[in-house]
Amino acid sequence: MTQPRTIIQKLWDAHVVAEPEGAPALLFIDLHLVHEVTSPQAFAGLRARGLKVRRPDLTLGTCDHSTPTTPRSLPIIDPIARAQVEQFERNCAEFGIPHFGFQSERQGIVHVIGPENGVTQPGMTVVCGDSHTATHGAFGALAFGIGTSEVEMVLATQCLPQRKSKSFAVRVEGALKPGVTAKDIILALIARIGVGGGTGCVFEYTGSTIRGLTMEERMTVCNMSIEGGARAGLVAPDDVTYEFLSGKPLAPNGADWDRALARWRQLPTDEGAAYDREISIDATALEPMITFGTNPGQGVGISQPIPDPSSVTDSVERDTLRKALQYMGLEPGKPLLGHPVNVVFIGSCTNSRMSDLRAAAEVLKGRKVSEGVRVMVVPGSQPIKKQAEAEGLHEIFQAAGAEWREAGCSMCIAMNGDQLKPGEYSVSTSNRNFEGRQGKGGRTFLASPLTAAASAITGRVTDVRTVLG
Amino acid sequence: MAEKITAFESRTVLLPVDNVDTDQIIPARFLKTISKEGLGDQLFYDWRYEADGTPKPDFVLNTEAAKGCAVLVAGDNFGCGSSREHAPWALTQFGFKAVISTSFADIFRNNSLKNGLLPVVVPKEVHEKLLATPSTVKVDLEKQTLTLEDGTAVEFPIDAFSRMCLLEGIDELGFILKHEDRIAAYEAQREITLDTRALA
């Protein structure tokens, strides 16, 4: 009898190309996503060695990180960003890689365009020079971020030397309360295990709560796996997955679909398979989450007080927390509720999809953004922008006083001119609250689109449950 | 191709902060470059310089004692966050050859090993000793040992392949290319039908 296997093990087994003596296994990569920031040095490396891209048909490029979100009729003002975007388009053209350039109607955030085009599929290995690649794990793919040297390796060989990670089951059970979202699940997990808690692991998110999530919600959860230290996080595919994929531009069709479906149905973890680590989360006990510190693990339920460094025993840990609160300008012992906010950012590969925009619009509809608060809504891709406009969401945002912008990473990474000023506070639906992440000296509270929209109305950190009524 | 590493001795620079993320190691605004060069001056930029660009005298990298140091000792979980390889590029261009911590983020560790920067994991008690005061340490990759100032030698873990690549300056891409026949054989039996070129 064969040993029961986890989906993580099955994905690994199906992609081993070779197991050379004294070296890590070579894994085949089914999909390589490329963007302008982490690829130029890799293309330069290919040129220096006289190598071609082995599988342009398994590669897809888009520009997103340093790409402005101002109207596309305007030029890219920052000459360094412009040079990078132009170099990216030249590199893709030279090496025959299909890509969505700055003016493409399909341009968008790299982790949005894969799923949107049906390129991300169950059972695949997916890599990208970006740590949020785990987003694609929502489809039951082994998806992880890589460095630029590895980007070059995959471009040249479609393979990567890899060591097997540990498996880490994250079981989430029970119904979410109103106002509590997928974002709150993942922020709660990271708050519990810490930003290094999943190092060396791949998360498999399981349980009734995860099964009940839509694909977009599953993407939000998987997206932030890296913030818990795990390079990858995934959800086994099910009918929700197949329904989402069906009819997407590059999803298999006809007889190919039937064959693919039969393959995909073999992926879920076998009964009785063992994980290296496990954790359980009671979804019924969750409330909307918010971060108070300078890493995504420094988060609390929105009604909970900010922890006190003096209660921490380890000295480096205590100083680290103290440093975080000092940077954030916050006092321990009190909840963040009511803290003034300068900017609200709704967007990023974590929360820029249709359901995120609809959720924010639901809160903002017929209301006004608090005076003096800048609210930026940045759709994840051009097709999402178009769809949102077809539904009239942009009018809701604009009538409320929010900015409706072009697609890109925007203020999640603040490389494209969208950024906080020193000292400013944001409530942000993005994934990182590191010092200066949203602009030098800027201070970030991570939260869900619902919490962000509610805070936009009041100009203060707000519990969305008090706004929904 | 990575520079060869064997053994070296250096004073340590201490950064007693947990979870140092790659946004601190090199802020994202410096990633608009299309080159690997010139990143050493941007290392820890926002911790290292005032708003007007003058060095902050109290930040450890700006001290006289940090000059010429090749070993950084930092808090737990060093290098968390983004996948930017600019982080090890910046560290090595500043002059670091090793970072010592109790743990490293996965992607950062991988990126470091490909760039001649040694992530040295030590047990908590050794880490505490190292963080107490700057000292002179010896890193020997051949023997996989870190020797402290008091003469104590501790073994540190590193996988055999990475160790060999660093010791001999072997390039991983060249290594993969040698498996061309296996890659072709794997490709021939793949069942996934995807051609991204249909989108272009």
Image (spheres, helix red, strand yellow):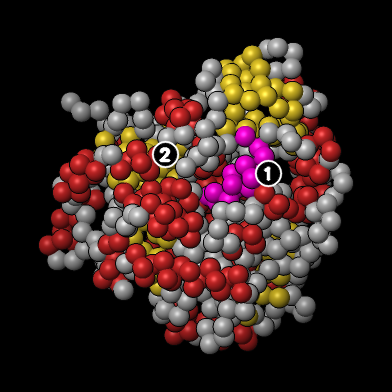
Residues in magenta, as a range: B83-97
Q: Nearer the viewer, residue B39 or A456?
A: B39
Q: What is the residue that sits farthest to the left in this orientation? A: A255
Q: Is residue A336 left or right of residue B93?
A: right
From the image, tell me which residue sits under label 2: B171
Q: Is residue B40 left or right of residue A240?
A: right
Q: Residue A48 placed where, x, y %? A: 42, 54
Which residue type carries mark 2? Asp
Q: Residue at x 81, y 26 (%)?
A: B133
From the image, tell me which residue sits under label 1: B94
Main secondary structure along the magenta-highlighted residues: helix
**Residue B92, magenta (yes or no):** yes
Q: Nearer the viewer, residue A32 or A92?
A: A92
Q: What is the residue that sits farthest to the right in this orientation? A: B57
Which residue type carries mark 1? Phe
Position of A315 relative to A306 (above/below): above
Q: Residues within 10 Å of mark 1 (few under 14, many from 20)?
A: many
Q: Residue at x 31, y 49 (%)?
A: A157
